[in-house]
Amino acid sequence: MKLKFICKAFLSSLTAVSLFVCPCNIASAATVHLPEESNQTAVCIEAQNLDIVNSLVETDRTTTVTYEDDLVITETEISYGRLPGAGFSAASTMAKSSYTTDWKTKTTDIATGSGKMLLRVVQFAEFQFNGSYVYVSDKSCVYYTYSTFSSKFVNSSESYTSSSNKSSKKAKYVVAGDLKWTTDSGTHKSHWTFKITCSPSGSISTSAKKS
């Protein structure tokens, strides 16, 4: 089923914004103006089979901050496990021949050196291993741009390892695009790739890279 809504408490823990409705896909992204954040625009660029409301609980959170050129990149990884009766996590099934991972969410905030927000990308991913290969079983991505410097995230694309890609290599969920913003010194542009990767052993890693 396509994304119908995201639980207010679940999304607000990542984005500090209120509940919104955004049924859309990458081919026809819908823009949603959030009333509580007048300088913020949210775009849902992909959604598939997202049925997580009232079934997940946070199990782990890690935040790292890096600096590149005049940008500050803050990456927050959160793992959500299913409540009892809602399924099995990778941790409880790793010894078996197949597993479904916990939900991994990755929030990447890109800001100027002065702290002005330019872009926030929130990815959700779940992986499955069927005993032979690992693939993306569920995913979605929402990104937010800010009006402070008229930031835009353009030429966005999405790719992932589907169940039809019978490979024993790592499964990947990748969102990429060009970040553009304008300051008094002119127009700036950088290309970004946001990735969540899962190995056949169930190890999940994430990255946000500028090129």
Image (cartoon, rainbow, N blue to C red):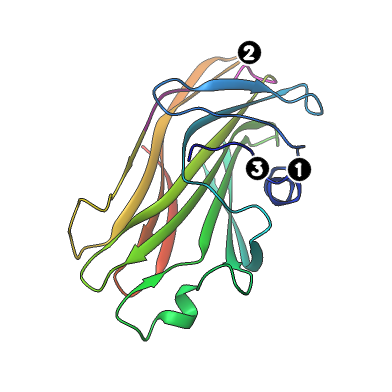
Image x and y of residue 98, in percent: 32, 75
Q: Which residues are magenta?
A: 148-157
Main secondary-structure element of the magenta-colored stretch:
strand
Whether 81 is drawn above or below 21: the answer is below
Circle 1 sits on which residue? Answer: 16
The C terminus: image quadrant: top left
Determine which quarter of the picture holds residue 55: bottom right
Q: Nearer the viewer, mark 1 or mark 3?
A: 3
Task: Give the class, few, some or many, for how many residues have Cα within 10 Å of label 2's Cα (few <14, many ≥20).
Answer: few
Q: Nearer the viewer, residue 13 or 192?
A: 13
Q: Could you give the CA–CA distance between mark 1 and mark 2, rounded to whole angstroms? A: 29 Å
Residue drawn at (18%, 60%) of the image: 167
Which residue is tagged 2?
Answer: 184
Can you give x and y, in whole percent of width and height, for residue 150 in the image?
62, 16
Label 1 – label 3 distance at C-alpha: 13 Å
State how far apart marks 3 and 2 are (Cα).
Answer: 37 Å
Marks 1 and 2: CB-CB under 8 Å?
A: no
Q: Mark 2 and mark 3 in contact (Cβ < 8 Å)?
A: no
Query: Image height check: is 188 above or below 47?
Result: above
Kindly indicate whether the residue at mark 3 contacts the one at mark 1 (C-beta within 8 angstroms).
no
Q: Position of residue 93 (x, y in %)?
A: 42, 80
Q: Nearer the viewer, mark 3 or mark 2?
A: 3
Q: Which mark is residue 6?
A: 3
Q: Secondary structure at mark 1?
A: loop
Q: Residue at x 48, y 40 (%)?
A: 1
| Circle 3 residues within 10 Å: few <14, some 14–19, many ≥20 | some
**Residue 150 is inside the magenta segment:** yes
User: Residue flagged by tag 2: what amino acid is it?
Assistant: Asp
Res 2 seen here: yes
| Residue 191 visible, this orientation | no
SS of the residue under disc 2:
loop
Q: Amino acid at mark 3?
A: Ile
